Amino acid sequence: MSQPLENAERERLEGQYAEIATLAGGLAHEIRNPLSTIGMNLELLAEELSSDDSPRTSRMHGKIQTVQRECERLEDILNAFLQFARAGELDLVESDLNQLVSDFIGFYRPQMSDRGIEVSPHLATDLPAVLIDWSLMRQVLDNLGRNAWQAMPDGGLLEVQTCVRDGQVNLDLIDTGMGMDETTRSRMFQAFFSTRAGGSGLGLPTVRKIVEAHRGTIRCDSELGRGTRFTIVLPVAETRT
């Protein structure tokens, strides 16, 4: 594709992202206000019932707590949707991907260790710079790291690797978890698809959207009982115009 066509396509996509983000922000505002009012009144009702320990009141209190949990779940879904809708808005900075990965590992290693998960980094020393939005790419790592530890409830190993392949920067996250079957792999990047109870189904679609907004690609190799590898490929900074 010629450079003028690439620029026109990029501008078209950025326009679409901006429109979706604006609509998502308005929708979130319209939903969040009544949701907050519902949550506040449920909290007040719970406080009023807390002084009465009769069986009937206890049952009412239990039902209120159920509705409160559902309100919290709606809030989580709303936040996930906003992240998904705004994933194309980039603030690009020429960066060392290894530094971002090291920050991620430093934050998550204690939590992983508590779950019996060893984190093993293998970061290339000659990695060229990439243009990334730090906040959004950190969101990518957070999502993939969360998926990895959920896949290893009994502990395991998470390898994080960076290298250069075919003139592009590669980031691999490899876990020794439960793995995925073919059906799950084929649908994992579809919005609202989730195999986890209570999951929004927007984590991995958001990851892919962020990576593609960076003109990168993401792929997944997984096998049941053997683990999962996510590979992110990004162009080096000097190849972008």
Image (cartoon, helix red, strand yellow):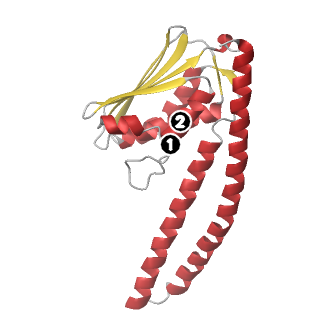
At label 1, counting other C-alpha atoms closer than 10 Å, the crowd grade (few under 14, some 14-19, many 20 or more) is many
139 shown above or below 66: above
**Relative side of 185 to 200, left or right:** left
| Pick the front one: 110 or 139 | 139
- Give coordinates of residue 70: x percent, y percent: 49, 66
Q: Quadrant of residue 197?
A: bottom left
61 shown above or below 189: below
Q: Quadrant of residue 221?
A: top left
Residue 132 shows in the view? yes
- Give coordinates of residue 151: x percent, y percent: 34, 40
SS type, badge 2: helix
- Give coordinates of residue 137: x percent, y percent: 59, 31
Q: Which mark is residue 203?
A: 1
What residue would you read off at disc 2?
207
Q: Residue at x 68, y 44 (%)?
A: 20
Quadrant of the image for the C terminus?
top right
Q: Hey, what amino acid is under mark 2?
A: Val
Question: Total number of numbered labels?
Answer: 2
**Relative side of 117 to 192, left or right:** left
